[in-house]
Amino acid sequence: MGRLFLVCFHGVRDFYICRICRTVIALNVHFRYPLQPHSDGATGLIFGEVANMYKREPMPHREVGRYETEDLYCVECGDLLGGELVRSLGPLELDDDPLYYLNPAKILHWNGRNTLDPTMLPATSSSDANPHEANPPEANPAVNPEANSEENL
């Protein structure tokens, strides 16, 4: 295996980080859609691009929902954060562009002001809607305690 490098993002204010070491993993502009809950309980976030992650070779593929994935680990702390979608096990086929699955329990979302927990965000009714647009973090008292202050009531 070659050298591992840490990619830094200067001036970016909306991104996802590793829950353990706070390394930037993905930018919000690369967020595609939430992985629909599956009968095996798999949920997650799908991204078009990720950074600061690596694959351990050789590793067997893992099934996540209706997809087969290759595991991806944080380059800084080595925690398993998700995987690259390799093959669809359902009726939908994958495009030629790679897609990456991130486990919401392993990452945090930084929106420029607050750190948000993707597992605590409200569910959306549309499968291709961005879950972060359903309720802005400013209105969520769990994320922004000032939302319950007397000025805002």
Image (cartoon, rainbow, N blue to C red):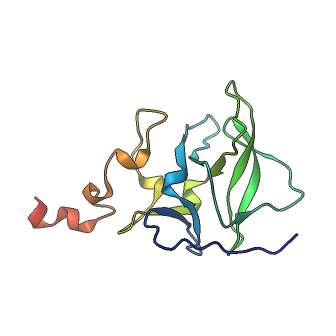
**In what quadrant of the picture does the C terminus appear?**
bottom left
Q: In the picture provided, is 53 more to the left or to the right than 46?
A: right
Residue at 63% x, 58% y is 50
Given residues 133 and 67, the one toward you in this image is: 133
Q: In the picture provided, is 150 more to the left or to the right than 45?
A: left
State the image quarter where residue 5 is shown.
Answer: bottom right
| Residue 107: percent from left, percent from top | 55, 62
Is 26 rendered above or below residue 9?
A: above
**In what quadrant of the picture does the N terminus appear?**
bottom right
Residue at 40% x, 63% y is 111
Is 29 rendered above or below residue 106?
A: above
Is 124 rendered above or below residue 15?
A: above
Residue at 25% x, 55% y is 139
| Residue 48: percent from left, percent from top | 61, 48
How many numbered marks are there?
0
Residue extending farthest top: 91
State the image quarter where residue 7 is shown.
Answer: bottom right
Residue at 33% x, 63% y is 143
Given residues 9 and 110, the one toward you in this image is: 9
| Residue 12: percent from left, percent from top | 47, 67
| Residue 79: percent from left, percent from top | 69, 67
